[in-house]
Image (spheres, coloured by chain):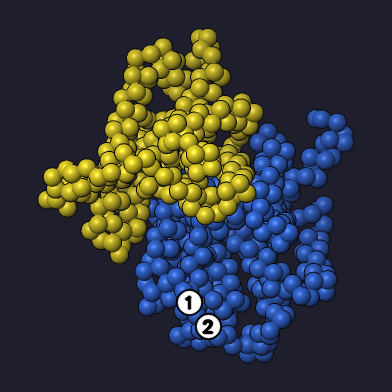
Amino acid sequence: MSLLLNILIDGVAYGMVLFMISVGLSVTMGLMRVINLAHGGFALIGGASCHWLIAEQGMSFWLAAPLGVAAVVALAWPLERLIYRRIYGFGDLQQVLATIGLTFLIIATVNRLFGSSLLALTLPDVLAQSVDLGFRTLPLHRLIVIGAGIVVIAGLWLLIDRTRFGIRLRAAVDNRATASAIGINTGLIYSATFCLGAGLAAVGGILGAEMLPIEAYYPLRYMVLFLIVVAVGGMGSISGSFAAAIALGVLDTATRYLVPDFGTIFFYACIILFLALRPNGLWGRTA
Amino acid sequence: MTDTTITPKRTGRIAGIPFLGEAILIALVLAAYFLFPYNLAFLTRILIMVLLVLSLDLVLGFAGIATLGQAAMYGTGAYAAGLFAVHVTGAPLPGLVVGALAGAVLAFISGLVLMRARGLTLIMLTIAVASICHEIANKARDVTGGADGLRGIRMEPVLGLFEFDFIGKTAYWYVFVVVFVVFLLLKRLANAPLGLSLKGLHESPERMAAIGAPVYRRLVLAYTLGGGIAGVAGALAAQVTQLVSLEVYSFNLSAEALIMLILGGTGRLYGAIIGTVIFMTVHHVAAAADPFNWLFLIGLMVLGVVFFLPKGLAHLPTALTRLVRGRT
């Protein structure tokens, strides 16, 4: 019983991190039809700048984390305007190639500035302390991660379902040409959505540094994981990404606990089975 | 797309002269042999990569199957040939056959599932297959040596005549002959009905289905053939380096092969060769000049190709003539 609860808590926390990083990827894929392999780079930049602010500038975590996210958003805006805008029109393979090129640039830059060692994010004492849950103690940090994930999904739901921006975004996802024809500024929607996704990836990167350690090759190492979340959740579906991220987080954690020797094999076998049966993901629309 | 020639253009013929490309190829390989006698190991690696990229060209360039998991077949071929050399015989040619079969069988089995998917799902599934292979090789320590790699491969002379030497002369020519034979076969295939039908699948699977082509079976067949060739490439790597490490299954290998192919131009056999040679050379020079920042240069190169030469370097002559004659 306590094993089950352990798997659940760790898995859900892990899933929340996966969700925060992947949701932007899913929405940009659904909206712009871009396979953005460089998305993990935003999580890396967020984590790396947060590391720099804490370790080199002596800032507190509470100040460094928002600044790290802001830095990523500030970088994502011109990147979208100058580079990604041109990538939208490319074919699938050209997109893959262009975004792999961008990933290489990000990795090489981080490598140059910080080296290839692990970039630790020192948590404030408050977050590092343990909480007693009755059946086990766990760092408060995990609970914060789960809480942050819930806040993000609730906030996204409010944004998409209850605001004018959300209506326009949904219209653009459903049919870009028509949305643009009835006077929705799709260019602006694209930029804003892209920056939102990049910012969320940075939040996930910073909060998830305990589970997915920040280092220069981060975007390549976890790229497959993020893409799997999107593929399983279905492109462009926020609730799909959420369900997929939590399910995969729990599945991955469970296989690590229960069949440690064959965890990865089992994990990927499940993914293959699922995607073979449902090639469009959980809630995926046939593209 | 727009030109509707009735007789299909023959792929792989330069300026219409038969066998001009092959002659240039042999001349270049000979020249490289005499110009860089101390870099034969590196040149051999380029040739092996050419074979892997050619296999990817068949799968992706001709049949249009988007894959980032070609390393699965390459690695399986490498392990199969390596284990065959350790446990059965060190004769190289039977090892190649074993590698080809291993790659083809894996491609066939995984292809039965993979070829039902398209787009992102397909790319994900191919990556997943390679990851599973990586994990199995990692866990089966008793058989594959796990993370330490498969050691103890001792090769016998090729055909019992040509001993593998220390400088790698035999290895160079051995690999070249194999790559060249596969290249000729692929060139033949490209102009054969099967190759044309694969190109048709690439352009429009719906229309091919409409004219009665068995789409799914053709895709599985193309994937299996590509897997067999990738298996040969892996087998060559295992025999020449006499070591198989887990790296053969790495995602980076698949990704780099894809970059090389698109760099040269997909669907053109010479494009696969040009792309591989240029990428490997830039990689080699950049890594030697600056071991820490070479990735930056590669990234810039990749972006440059995508933005300025979207059809690959093989398209450069056409692009230049168009520029000179004025945009048409």
Q: Nearer the viewer, residue B11 or B107?
A: B107
Residue type beneath disc 2: Ile
Residue B327 percent coordinates (x, y): 82, 30
The label number, if any, that marks residue A126 in the structure image: none
The picture's colour for chain A is yellow
Assign a secondary structure to mark 2. Answer: loop
Residue located at (60% from left, 56% from top): B257
Q: Is residue A35 visible?
A: no
> 10 Å neighbourhood of mark 1: few (<14), some, or many (≥20)?
many
Q: Name the residue tied to disc 1.
A: B150
Label 2 marks a residue whose chain is B
Q: Quadrant of the N terminus of chain B?
A: top right
Tell me if A166 is positioned left or right of A151 in this view: right
Relative to B2, is A282 on the left or the right? Answer: left
Residue linked to disc 2: B153
Chain drawn blue, letter?
A: B
Please tell me which residue is depicted at 60% across the width and 31% down the height of the picture.
Answer: A79
**Percent coordinates x, y for residue B24 in the rendering:** 81, 63
In the rendered image of this protein, does residue A150 appear above or below residue B17? above
Give B223 or B212, whichever is nearer the viewer: B223
- The span from disc 1 to disc 2 (Cα, nearest Å) is 8 Å
- Type of the residue with mark 1: Leu
